[in-house]
Image: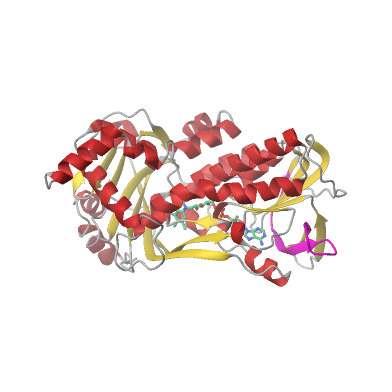
Amino acid sequence: MNRHIVLHERSQRLNAPRRDAHAVVIGGSIAGLLAARVLADYFGTVTIFEKDPLVDGAEPRPGVPQGRHVHSIWKRGLSLMEESFPGLTAELIEGGSAEVEMTKDFAWYHRGVWKLRVPSGIVITCQTRPFLEWHIRRRVCQISNIGLVDRCYVKRFVTDTTAGRITGVVVQSRGVGATEETVAADLVVDASGRGSRTPRWLEELGYGRPEMSVIDVDVGYATRFYARPPIEDCPWKALIIAPTPPDGTRLGVIFPVEGQRWIVMLGGWNGDHPPRDEDGILEFARNLEAPDIYTFMRDAEPLTPIVGYKFRANVRRHYERMRRFPGGLIVLGDSLCSFNPIYGQGMTTSALDAMTLRECLERGVRKGETIDAMAHHFLKRVPRRLEAPWRMAAGEDMNWPGTQGDAPFGTPFMNWYFGRVHALAARDPQVLVRFVRVANMIDSPVRVFHPRVLAPVLTRSARGRR
Ligand SMILES: Cc1cc2nc3c(=O)[nH]c(=O)nc-3n(C[C@H](O)[C@H](O)[C@H](O)COP(=O)(O)OP(=O)(O)OC[C@H]3O[C@@H](n4cnc5c(N)ncnc54)[C@H](O)[C@@H]3O)c2cc1C
């Protein structure tokens, strides 16, 4: 692994990419790696600090425990990653990822009915999360001005004398006898995930904590791997059996991943968590709304034990609402907003955050802004991008009566409308493709209010049909 720390004098104006400027990224996971790729075009040196030991391979690691579970990457996220690392998709496929057409190859049971299996042209790759992260990490490590320092824990921020701006971080390596070091930075990017300490560190600096939106869903996962035949021989390439709320709370997913394996995940909302013993998990699968995953699991030979994961709540931190926020700091990825993982939005949203960072940096260079002005612009801009995925996740979760929290504005109407769109998508290919484009974050949710969808929804409702 490439390791170096370069310390620079503080330099603030962004009137051109600054070869003497230094950006620090906290966390070497998906959001941190994607942000570092962007920063490398504008800062002389970018240093990523990652607390975990990193290996040159697709290994799960303790800092990313969710990495053992299904991670679907939506088309928009994959496209943004491909833009950042041209050839990435081909490398994934070469390494064993399966290509899956989102509507033709997916067998999807949703709201009591199978969706149509028609072509949409939306093709994603399916692989494990460690495999995707490893491919991105390899590409990041090839960029000469990015240093990735693993086994190194960021302990707190460093500020200027007025505490008006973050000027670096204090780090400590995990080796025996390692001492704290101060690393100066012109910009610090927090990509340390859901457990981010930025709220606490800001409070200690006198800024207070950000307000939070919390939607408590109490979701549980259980995951296991199975051997699979060549994907061409399978009747479907991916299978989803989703529940019908409010009574149905159980979901099952089978995705193809590298190494000729299936990853099988069972999940449940509102405390209905899958057990991790053999009989219990089969019984859970038997209670899904269609029998296909149960029969698969009953007859297939597992490769691994069952692993579990509990996810309590969608959490969004509203830094943009804080009365004061220091200069020199950006928060993105799960540190900023973490969604119910069942909707598979986290990595794509991290890619959108990185894209927003690039837009803000480009604008900053064009306008000759300071780094702080650029970061302030990011602070105000990124929440707008979070609005659609937040509404989709938090709003959808409100369909289950045990979900607690403040529903986004308009949720009852949206859930009524989307319920009808789902019913239509089971028989109208155009509606299905429109919906799948929105779910893949290619199009804005506004697109499902197109007259081609709105008209049949209203007509059928007027006739009392779904
Ligand atoms: C069960 C589950 C399933 C999911 N499924 C999907 C899915 O299907 N599709 C999808 O798009 N998303 C999914 N997600 C979300 C996805 O995992 C995240 O959105 C994605 O990993 C981006 O997160 P991140 O990089 O911001 O943070 P993380 O992935 O959590 O990474 C944070 C990194 O920061 C490091 N770190 C933390 N603190 C420090 C510190 N002080 N110093 C140094 N390093 C530090 C950690 O070790 C870690 O490497 C799922 C999440 C869960 C929980």
Query: 171 or 18: nearer the eye?
Result: 18
Q: Does the magenta stretch include residue 424?
A: no
Quadrant of the rendered image containing residue 145: top right
In this picture, is 465 found above or below 397? Answer: above
Query: 308 or 373: nearer the eye?
Result: 373
In this picture, is 461 found above or below 394? Answer: above
Q: Residue at x 25, y 44 (%)?
A: 422
Where is residue 189 shown, x and y percent of the image? 68, 52
Name the main secondary structure of what is drawn in magenta.
strand
Q: Is 444 left, or right, of 137 in this rendering?
A: left
Query: 102 or 423: nearer the eye?
Result: 423
Q: Which residue is drawn at 66% across and 63% down?
A: 323
Going by the picture, which residue comes out furthest to the right?
Answer: 9
In this picture, is 248 found above or below 148? Answer: below
Q: Which residue is drawn at 63% across and 62% down?
A: 322
Q: Is 121 left, or right, of 194 in this rendering?
A: left
In the rendered image, is residue 14 in sight?
A: yes
In the rendered image, is residue 115 in sight?
A: no
Where is residue 37 shown, x and y percent of the image? 66, 39
Q: What stretch is highlighted in magenta?
A: 147-168
Where is residue 227 shown, x and y percent of the image? 35, 45
Q: Which residue is drawn at 36% across and 55% down?
A: 410
Q: Is residue 155 magenta?
A: yes
Ligand 1 is found in the corner quadrant, namely: bottom right
Where is residue 465 shown, x and y percent of the image? 13, 46
